[in-house]
Image (tube, grey):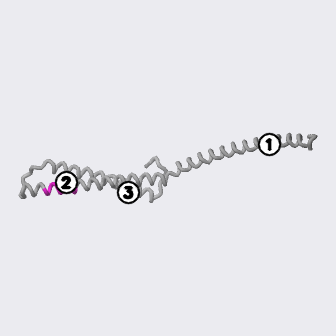
Amino acid sequence: MASQRALPQSKEALLKSYNKNLKDDIKSMLDNFTEIIKLARGEEESQVSKTTQIEQDQYEMQVRGSNIVRAGESLMKLVSDLKQFLILNDFPSVNDSITKNSKLYKDLQSECDTKLLTLRDDMAVDLFELEDEYYSSSYK
């Protein structure tokens, strides 16, 4: 962020929020995946029956898998928000694009003006020649 221009407080807070969400979602994914791996090892002696323990582990794996999916969707939303932030707040790029397009259209306008002036001059010469021919004609 040091390379960026000084951002207003709201933008700075928004970027910090994005950074916090990123870290939280990645941590959630990592923690849930780690717990799923621990559950997959299994075979711990406990007070409950094996069938009950398997059902409990299966349910916990489903919940943790759902948490991983939720965190992934949150990361996708974060990417979308960052793209939108960049598009809406990248004023130097927008200004460069506007300047470039403005120059392109001014060059095109001057080219069209030049062609129109050349066409006008050619038509004036042709019209002069036609008038001269008409008025000097013996068939009038």
Residue 114 spot, x, y in % from top left = 73, 42
| Residue picked out by circle 3 | 17
Quadrant housing residue 59 = bottom left
Dot 1, how many residues are within 10 Å of its Cα: few (below 14), some (14-19), or many (20+)? few
Dot 3, how many residues are within 10 Å of its Cα: few (below 14), some (14-19), or many (20+)? few
Residue 55 spot, x, y in % from top left = 13, 56
Choose the circle earlier in sequence order: 1 or 3.
3
Quadrant housing residue 56 = bottom left
| Residue picked out by circle 2 | 61
- Nearer mark to the viewer, of 2 and 3: 2
> Which quadrant does the C terminus fall into?
top right
- Nearer mark to the viewer, of 2 and 1: 1
- Report the side of 67 relative to 139 (left or right): left
In the displayed structure, 75 sits above or below 118; it is: below
| Residue picked out by circle 1 | 123
Residue at figure coordinates x 68%, y 46% from the top left: 109
Residue extending furthest toward the right = 138
Which element is circle 1 on? helix
Tell me the magenta residue range.
55-63
Which amino acid, by three-letter code, is at mark 2? Met
Which of the two residues, 137 or 85, is positioned nearer the viewer here? 137
Residue at figure coordinates x 33%, y 54% from the top left: 73
Which of the two residues, 50 or 35, is positioned nearer the viewer here? 50
- Nearer mark to the viewer, of 1 and 3: 1
